[in-house]
Structure formats: C-alpha cells, structure tokens
Image: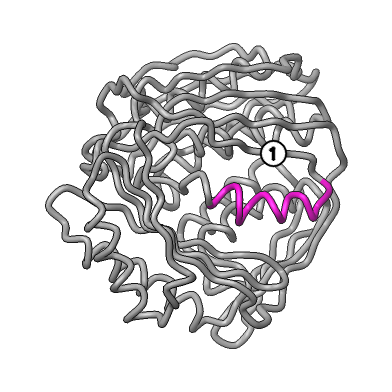
C-alpha cells in the first residue's frame, strides 16, 4: 500500500450486485495502491458470496501484487485486500472448476497494463461457459481495441474447457479436463481512442463449436443462422473439439472498420439446438438494429482501460446495469469523469 492512502469501503450489493464489483475493485486496488474492504459480496445472486471462480480472481490479484488478504474463501461475503507493488512476471492460476478463465484474465489484465510490466499468466478452468464472455470475445472483440490504445497483449487458447454441456449447472463442479488460456503482456503506454461510427459490415461468420456431441447439433444451429440472418454456407463452419469436456457454443461474429461484435449462444442439456441458435440470432439482430459500433459487453470492458488512458469515447446502445455499476465502482477510486450522453436511440460514453 502507498503511504497515506486510506482504505475504501465497498458495498457489494450495490448496482447489479454481482462479481463485476469485486473484479473492478481488485483491479483498481492494485492500480491505485488503496486497500479495500468489500461487504455483501455478490448479494444480488442466488448463491451470494465468493464462488470458486471469484475466489480465483482474488488469488490471482493477490499473487500479482503480493497483497495481504482476509476472507478469501468460498462463500465468504466479506473480503479485505491490501495490495503491494506488482513484482510477479509469471502467474499460474487454477480455478479447479469450469469457472470462467476470461473473468480471471479481466481482473489482472488492466493492472498489469497500468504497471507497464511484462506478465505471462496461465489460467486453468472454463474457457466457454454461459456465465461469462468466451475466449473468442476477449481475443477478437476486446483485445483489438486495447491494441489500438497501444497495449501489447496477446491471449492464447491452449485448450478448450466447457461447463459439461449443462449450462450454468456445470460451472461449480470439479472438472478433470479444464481448459487453459495464456495471457502475455509486454510493457506499453495506453492512449485514448474513440469508437463512434458503426460503418458497414465487412465480414461475418457463424461457428458452431462441438465437444463430444453429434455433428447434427451444429448442422441444426447453422440452418437457423442461415434462415434467420441470411448467412451464406461459406460464412458458416463447424469446429469439433476432442477435449475439454462436453459442450456446444455457437459463435456469431460481424466485423466493421472500427471493430467486431461477437454473440455467443451456449448449448444446455435439454435445450434444443434450434432454440440455442434462435436466441443467439435474436441477440445479434438486436445489435445490428441499434447501428452502434460497441455492443453491451464491450461497453462494460472498455470503461476501465479508457479511464486509465486518460480519456476516450464510444457509442453504444443504452448501458446495461452491469456497465453503470462498473462506472460507479471506478468512481470510488479514480477522479476521472465518465459522462453518458443521449445520441438518438443510443448513447455516447465520454471518459475524461
């Protein structure tokens, strides 16, 4: 902790009342050097307190900066975290379940960028589960904007990890075939960017990913995509994975001059492939109808790096409660204005 900095008391039941408050608070505690005390952790969830994937975020943050931590255990609703300076250049984190590796990456990514230090982190757990962005979203949607900001960061999918084909019900189970992501960061300087114009679509694709499921599941999903969104056969593909458990995810991607959007539909036990695809198609259609360059989940993730870069702006559909909660949490740590301005049916978020 830096001398003279007081601790921040955080109510985890505020806003959307989920894990985003925890992850953003951990990241900003490391960045600012200010200790935190979080109460009512995940009070808005059916199973409040730290689950194993949230505990993995705490442990990753602790390992990154040598923090002193109290309350780091499963089901804990209270956590004290006193950060140190970032010293580590190599981390290995094992969630132990199919809990989200991408959420662990989100916790440590921006602090490492802010510290301008090299980092290599491997995270074992779920790479594709319905409670978090899949690997492809971070790699193909979020990271290109970080690259535009000057970040030197790569993310590698070493091994798929699914939640057992049972949707959210499989995330907390111990799994033998955990997936793995590797995050690599080189020192660099973040700079502001603006993402305001949607522009025409330059490419699109639909990929049905299968792990130990019959091919007809993917075939049926892609038929719905062709019928609902008019995708051509050349824009559709099947990726079969022979490891990482049992699972299915449908990835729908569109690319424009200023970036990409990716929508994921996750197969669940007892849910027909046609319904999985219909839901994903509806989500992508809603994004396209909004005619904005930044989707709901990307809006949430751009806030913190832009605040640390000293400014920037993006246009998106009206913010989710997840994003507004993130803005409120950032405001507890940083004196950086974040304004949300109406822009027709959309909004422009201006940082700095």
> Dot 1 lies on which element?
strand
- Magenta stretch, overall SS: helix
Q: Is residue 78 left or right of residue 6?
A: left
Quadrant of the rendering where the C terminus is positioned: bottom right
Q: Is residue 49 left or right of residue 155?
A: left
- Along the viewing direction, whichever of 287 and 16 lies nearer the viewer: 287
Residue at image x 54%, y 66%?
295
Q: Would you say residue 307 is visible in this rendering?
A: yes
Image-quadrant location for residue 170: top left
Q: Which residue lies most toward the left here?
A: 270
Q: Would you say residue 40 is visible in this rendering?
A: no
- Would residue 139 be counted in the magenta stretch? yes
Residue at image x 36%, y 43%?
129
Quadrant of the rendering where the N terminus is positioned: top right
**Label 1: which residue?**
154
Residue at image x 24%, y 65%?
220
- Indicate the position of residue 19 as horizontal and vertical percent values: 44, 39
Q: Is residue 148 left or right of residue 210?
A: right
- Would residue 59 be counted in the magenta stretch? no
- Along the viewing direction, whichever of 195 and 161 lies nearer the viewer: 161
- Along the viewing direction, whichever of 112 and 258 lies nearer the viewer: 258
Residue at image x 22%, y 66%?
275
- Reply above or below: 347 against 128: below
- Indicate the position of residue 156 as horizontal and vertical percent values: 60, 36
Magenta segment, which residues? 137-150
- Indicate the position of residue 193 as horizontal and vertical percent values: 80, 61
């Amino acid at each position: 902790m830096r001398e003279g900095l007081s601790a921040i008391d955080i109510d985890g039941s505020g806003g959307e009342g989920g894990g985003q408050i925890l992850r953003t608070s951990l990241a900003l505690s490391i960045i600012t050097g200010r200790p935190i005390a979080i109460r009512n952790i995940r009070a808005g969830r059916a199973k409040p307190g730290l689950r194993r994937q949230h505990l993995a975020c705490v442990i990753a943050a602790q390992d990154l900066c040598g923090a002193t931590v109290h309350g780091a255990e499963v089901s804990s609703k209270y956590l004290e975290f006193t950060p140190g300076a970032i010293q580590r250049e190599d981390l290995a984190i094992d969630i132990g379940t199919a809990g989200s590796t991408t959420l662990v990456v989100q916790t440590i990514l921006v602090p490492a960028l802010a510290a301008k230090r090299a980092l290599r982190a491997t995270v074992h757990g779920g790479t594709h589960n319905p409670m978090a962005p899949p690997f492809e979203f971070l790699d193909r949607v979020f990271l290109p904007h970080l690259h535009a900001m000057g970040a030197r960061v790569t993310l590698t999918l070493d091994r798929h990890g699914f939640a057992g084909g049972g949707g959210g019900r499989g995330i907390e189970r111990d799994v033998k075939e955990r997936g793995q992501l590797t995050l690599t960061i080189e020192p660099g300087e973040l700079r502001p960017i603006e993402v305001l114009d949607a522009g025409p679509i330059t490419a699109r694709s639909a990929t049905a990913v299968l792990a130990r499921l019959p091919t007809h599941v993917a075939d049926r999903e892609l038929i719905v995509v062709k019928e609902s969104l008019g995708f051509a056969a050349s824009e559709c593909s099947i990726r079969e994975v022979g490891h990482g458990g049992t699972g299915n995810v449908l990835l729908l991607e569109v690319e424009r001059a200023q970036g990409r959007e990716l929508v994921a539909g996750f197969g669940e036990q007892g849910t027909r492939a046609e319904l999985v695809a219909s839901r994903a198609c509806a989500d992508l259609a809603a994004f396209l109808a909004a005619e904005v360059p930044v989707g709901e989940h990307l809006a949430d993730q751009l806030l913190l790096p832009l605040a640390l870069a000293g400014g920037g702006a993006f246009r998106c559909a009206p913010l989710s409660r997840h994003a507004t909660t993130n803005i409120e949490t950032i405001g507890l740590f940083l004196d950086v204005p974040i304004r949300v301005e109406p822009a027709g049916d959309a909004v422009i978020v201006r940082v700095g």
